[in-house]
Amino acid sequence: MKYRPEIDGLRALAIIPVILFHAEIGILNAGYFGVDVFFVISGYLITSIILSESESGGFSFIKFYDRRARRILPALYLVVFVSIIFAWIFMSSGMMWDFWQSVISVPLFVSNILFTLENGYFEVATNIKPLVHIWSLSVEEQFYLFFPIFLILLLKFSKEKTMFILACIAIISLFLAHFNQYISLSFLPLNHTLLRLDSFGWSSFYMPFGRAWELLLGSLIAFKKPISINKSYHQLISFTGLIAIILSMIFFSSDIDSPSLYNLIPVIGTVLVIVFAKNDKGIGKLLSIKALTIIGLLSYSLYLWHQPVFAFYRISSLQQITPASFFILLVIIFFLSWFTYKYVETPFRNKNNFSRKNIFFLSFISGVLLILIGLFGLSDYGRNLHYSSIISSIPKERINMVIDMKKEGLIAGKKGALFSESFNDAKNKKIKILLLGDSQVGNWNRAIASNNSLINKRYQIASINIDALCYKYLIKDGGVPKYCESSVMKLIESDAISDSKYIFLLESFDKDTVKQIKHLLLFLSSSEEKLILVKNAEFTDLTKLSLQLARDTDISDIFSSDVKQFLFDNKLKKTTLIHKEIDKIADKSNIKTISEYDFYCTNNECNLFSKNLRPFMYDSMHVTDVGAKHLGKKIFSHLEDLNQR
């Protein structure tokens, strides 16, 4: 296949916005569209290679996967191995739990599925995940695994029929992407994982079903069917395509649904540039200038390195990236990318340096090693070893600030389910309160139990756990997924709803599950006035924040106004949007709400530590023992206020 320098220029146009977007310095809020450009280019190049070799009779699946392995895996695995070293040094126990899972997902090519289940590409917490960007490589790897086989089978028919079938699949994929929220497979017997995927959408941001159309549009233009457009218009069309890409990145934001019809703008723009731009004229010549082609050649390594560099900068400091720090980090990213391109990418692509057998062997061994390292990190021994290495570098007076997330989580799990699902003595005169929801119910259970002597005098508590994903089945006849069966039946058959004076809904809602409240309201229609929606408090992982604060020797007072403002600034961005949605629902249905942030924060300052410097939470929202005592007192105070109104 003939080298096209303008495509490397197009790669540069894709990678620069992605880097700016992940830096979060307020430039190109839709820079993530650069990934869409990459998908189109990948579809075009891969299909061009397959068509060229199949037409000459020289296509081989072994040769194809050999090239893909050489192109993708050496640099990718290098970045992951280096990230492991920095993660061990700088990450807290809570962050390491997620990190090890992301490490394991890389060689299995399922990073996109993992991050779909973790949910939230545009949340603040995502910017401290060093490997979150690997989701797009997983989508491409999944495409490379299945598409060549599918295309070779299709080519047994005519090219016209092949193109027609690919176009139909692309249209279906775009339809699935745009109408993702309306498509559900919940009628199937789904487990919890599949039910979560179904809730977020099978064609959501990370998933291949909603991205296939972008790759397939690139694939379709590789067939090079004659286009009856006067050549004098080619430059105008390619210019229009370039402008479409740039303007979409400037004027759209992260608030739009993606992938969706909005993505058609940069995708069609990319198609127009690839088809009509020529490297010796106009836009093609512009994209072929040396500076852009060099960035394009480095684009893969730039993509691999930029997110870990940004993430570890944020993790190791108490600051977000500023324009000044961005420039320094950019120099580091370019140096690492140049080094990787010159000493890893280029040598591994050379068959004289590494035979096919060696490439497959090294790829397999490296992948297995990453999986084993990840599993070791998730094990009790690995966790304890990491925790010991962390506290060895912390001043003795601040060791209390460093918590073991897994250990605290196990304690919370044992102490979370403390109240029965009904009121044992419904006839007594105590005020009856039903707690309803997910693990946030466990938070309140622990909090109330920690202050039982205070609360038990006036109040009787019952609690029922139910996932927001199960609300819709409270008003359906049959077809309840196995995961929801128990909680749905308990709630339907419970007398606690009618016996209670107040029902507190405690859920860690996201933008998808908050929409499920309407189903619960229909179920509680006769008891709706009892309902109180609790807007839960979520912060950037407190194991991270407390570790940062413990290490920062410049901070003499953990309870200073500066530290409290820092903690306030680390409220999760997503909760602001979710709380607004909850308020809309509450206003519409005349339902009370309370915000847990009021239990921790006042006047733009938050206190998340006890007097002996123990954190109130062991992750972003679940309370430790001391956090439970603090929360319980606040709950009691709120209940007293509620009953005096």
Image (cartoon, helix red, strand yellow):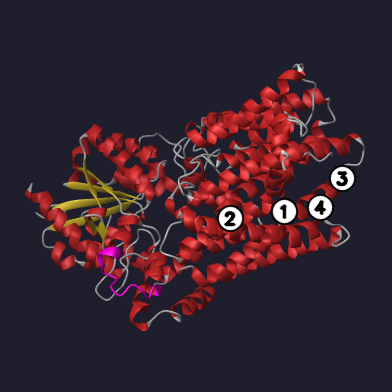
Q: Which residue is mark 4?
A: 66
Q: Which residue is mark 1?
A: 72
Q: Is residue 90 left or right of residue 59?
A: left
Q: Is residue 8 left or right of residue 516?
A: right
561 drawn magenta: yes
Which of the two residues, 509 or 546, is positioned nearer the viewer here? Answer: 546
Q: Residue at x 76, y 34 (%)?
A: 279
Type of amino acid at the residue the image marks with label 3? Ser
Distance from disc 4 to disc 1, alpha carbons, whole Å, reads 10 Å
Residue 131 appears in the figure = no
Kindly report which numbered mark, 2 or 1, lies closer to the viewer in this rendering: 2
Disc on the earlier residue, 3 or 2:
3
Residue 575 percent coordinates (x, y): 35, 48
Residue 418 percent coordinates (x, y): 28, 63
**Local secondary structure at mark 4:** helix
Cβ atoms at labels 3 and 2 below 8 Å apart:
no
Distance from disc 2 to disc 4, alpha carbons, whole Å, reads 26 Å
Kindly report which numbered mark, 3 or 1, lies closer to the viewer in this rendering: 1
Q: Main secondary structure of the magenta part?
A: loop
Disc on the earlier residue, 3 or 1:
3
**Local secondary structure at mark 1:** helix
Q: Residues within 10 Å of mark 3 (few under 14, many from 20)?
A: few
Using the image, determine if residue 240 lies above or below residue 52.
Answer: above
Q: Residue at x 81, y 52 (%)?
A: 66
Point out the residue furthest to the right here.
57
Q: Quadrant of residue 277?
A: top right
Disc on the earlier residue, 4 or 1:
4
Q: Which residue is mark 2?
A: 306
Q: Which residue is mark 3?
A: 60
**Local secondary structure at mark 2:** helix
Cβ atoms at labels 4 and 3 below 8 Å apart:
no
